[in-house]
């Protein structure tokens, strides 16, 4: 049972230490406070020294919702492939079950929250590239700043053990005050410059596109998404803060995310929601079919119109709609969606977009929805399992967290996951950025290659690799 009380963190820690002694277990104490406004990026930057490598950043496309985590009070990590969604849910449930929570505000995105994600395909052989990321990886932060509809909240999470005593509270309180003081400072970062840029085997990639498209013409596979990688080398260590700053400024309609793990950082700005659960309300998004932005309004409109009427792109999109609709109907009632796609316009690209909503059945949890939906044909293909097997066989890239679900899960079972595209992995002074595209039987290798070039742009620009 989750215990919700209205006493102080100090008494909570005392009670948790007693409980820890009695049960020989670790007990989470969590407190939510409303605080003065604080810039999300300054908070993230303030944690650099003490919590560097153990931070996360999340911004919802609405501009009004941010969650920033510093430190790790608990990690849920596993490389187990079978039932990985269920295992994370179970471990999170057990951890929360014993928790003592002081939460007077009851605002979504505050309180004990697990932030993280899942690799695209746990059965793909893992390379050194992703050695710092387990195939399921969630962090429950020490401190979390939440900005929700103009209000700012701080959640403090402390795991109490039987060996702790009263001095533990003082240490936590000092740590908290120090952090809040630091978050009011202004941060400056030295610019970096790109010294090398390498496309990983573009010709081999185009050949594999042609080969997969030949297969699609024969069936039974209808769609397969193939991705590729660009390696970037800089003159010095890449700082995460300016990259986030750029993504926030340039990709306003996207989820901006960063997840640090053991010094590496997975970062991106994705326009694509996988699923959001708010009590019994479920929201998903079909996003597939792409074209460039125009150089002026007239050209942009003309490009948008041709996307909305292009058979190849409409089919590519429709496979996603059919699959998501079916998955939602299996787990939800009242599934509704528009009959035709709209355009979603981003800085560098425009897409076909269909939102889907439904009402979750009683036993439908957020991670069971993630399991059901991932990967949608926007990132995997159709039918799902054979398409993922095809990708595993022909794709050179180790996708790791690219195109996987990334997001958060709170102690009430609410949360949201985006599809981790338009993203890259930062490792010291190097970065790998990723882009894929949905292949259908009418795909042409050169056109798909150009589409991936556009999809590299958000990360390339954020890293200072192109003038935007
Ligand atoms: C795979 C990516 O994007 C996906 C593929 C799309 C397409 O092929 O048209 C469009 C949106 C995304 O669902 C990516 O950005 O890397
Ligand atoms: Mg496409």
Image (cartoon, rainbow, N blue to C red):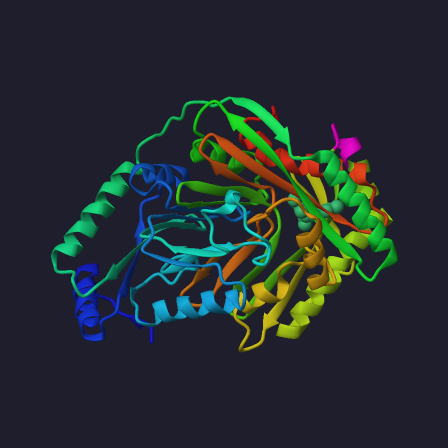
In the depicted structure, whether residue 250 falls above or below residue 196: below
Q: In which quarter of the image is the C terminus?
A: top right
- The number of callouts visible is 0
Q: Is residue 137 left or right of residue 423?
A: left
Magenta region: which residues? 294-300
Q: Residue furthest bottom?
A: 362
Q: In this view, does 378 lie to the left or right of 171?
A: right
Whether residue 172 is visible to the viewer of this picture, yes or no, is yes
The stretch drawn in magenta includes residue 297: yes
Whether residue 246 is visible to the viewer of this picture, yes or no, is no
Residue 56 location (% of width, % of height): 42, 47
In the depicted structure, whether residue 10 falls above or below residue 297: below
Query: Front-most of 181 and 18?
Result: 18
Residue 451 location (% of width, % of height): 73, 38
Q: In this view, does 189 lie to the left or right of 297?
A: left
Q: Is residue 31 left or right of residue 85?
A: left
Query: Front-most of 194 and 113?
Result: 194
In the depicted structure, whether residue 339 falls above or below residue 397: below
Residue 352 location (% of width, % of height): 74, 49
- Which quarter of the picture shows residue 385? bottom right
The stretch drawn in magenta includes residue 258: no
Q: In which quarter of the image is the N terminus?
A: bottom left
Residue 5 location (% of width, % of height): 26, 69
Residue sitting at x 31%, y 45%: 36
């Amino acid at each position: 049972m989750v215990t919700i009380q209205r006493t102080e963190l100090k008494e909570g820690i005392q009670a948790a230490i007693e409980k820890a002694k009695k049960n020989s277990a670790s007990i989470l104490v969590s407190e939510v406070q409303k605080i003065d406004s604080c810039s999300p990026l300054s908070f993230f930057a303030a944690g650099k020294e003490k919590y560097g490598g153990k931070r996360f950043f999340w911004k919802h496309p609405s501009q009004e919702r941010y969650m920033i985590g510093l430190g790790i009070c608990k990690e849920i990590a596993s490389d187990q492939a079978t039932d990985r969604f269920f295992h994370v849910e179970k471990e999170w449930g057990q951890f929360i079950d014993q928790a003592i929570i002081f939460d007077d505000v009851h605002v979504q995105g505050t309180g004990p929250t697990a932030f993280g994600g899942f690799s695209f395909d746990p059965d793909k052989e893992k390379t050194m590239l992703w050695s710092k990321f387990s195939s399921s990886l969630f962090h429950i932060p020490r401190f979390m700043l939440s900005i929700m509809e103009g209000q700012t909240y701080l959640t403090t999470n402390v795991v109490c053990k039987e060996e702790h005593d009263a001095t533990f509270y003082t240490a936590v309180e000092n740590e908290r005050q120090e952090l809040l003081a630091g978050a009011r400072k202004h941060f400056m970062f030295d610019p970096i410059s790109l010294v090398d840029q390498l496309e990983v085997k573009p010709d081999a990639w185009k050949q594999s596109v042609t080969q997969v498209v030949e297969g699609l013409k024969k069936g039974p596979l209808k769609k397969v998404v193939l991705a590729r990688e660009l390696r970037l080398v800089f003159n010095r260590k890449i700082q995460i803060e300016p990259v986030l700053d750029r993504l926030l400024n340039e990709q306003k309609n996207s989820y901006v995310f960063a997840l640090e793990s053991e010094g590496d950082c997975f970062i991106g700005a994705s326009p694509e929601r996988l699923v959001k659960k708010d009590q019994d309300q479920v929201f998903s998004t079909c996003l597939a079919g792409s074209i460039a932005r125009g150089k002026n309004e007239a050209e942009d409109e003309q490009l948008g119109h041709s996307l909305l009427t292009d058979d190849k792109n409409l089919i590519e999109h429709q496979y996603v709609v059919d699959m998501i609709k079916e998955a939602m109907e299996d787990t939800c009632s009242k599934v509704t969606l528009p009959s035709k796609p709209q355009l979603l316009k981003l800085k560098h690209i425009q897409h076909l977009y269909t939102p889907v909503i439904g009402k979750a059945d009683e036993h439908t949890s957020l991670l069971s929805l993630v399991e059901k939906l991932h990967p949608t044909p926007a990132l995997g293909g159709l039918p799902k399992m054979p398409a993922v097997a095809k990708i595993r066989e022909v794709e050179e890239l180790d996708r790791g967290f690219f195109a996987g679900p990334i997001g958060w899960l709170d102690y009430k079972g609410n949360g949201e996951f985006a599809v981790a595209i338009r993203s890259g992995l930062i490792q010291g002074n190097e970065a790998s950025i990723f882009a894929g595209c949905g292949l259908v039987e009418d795909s042409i290798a050169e056109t798909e290659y150009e589409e991936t070039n556009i999809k590299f742009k958000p990360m390339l620009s954020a890293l200072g690799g192109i003038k935007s």
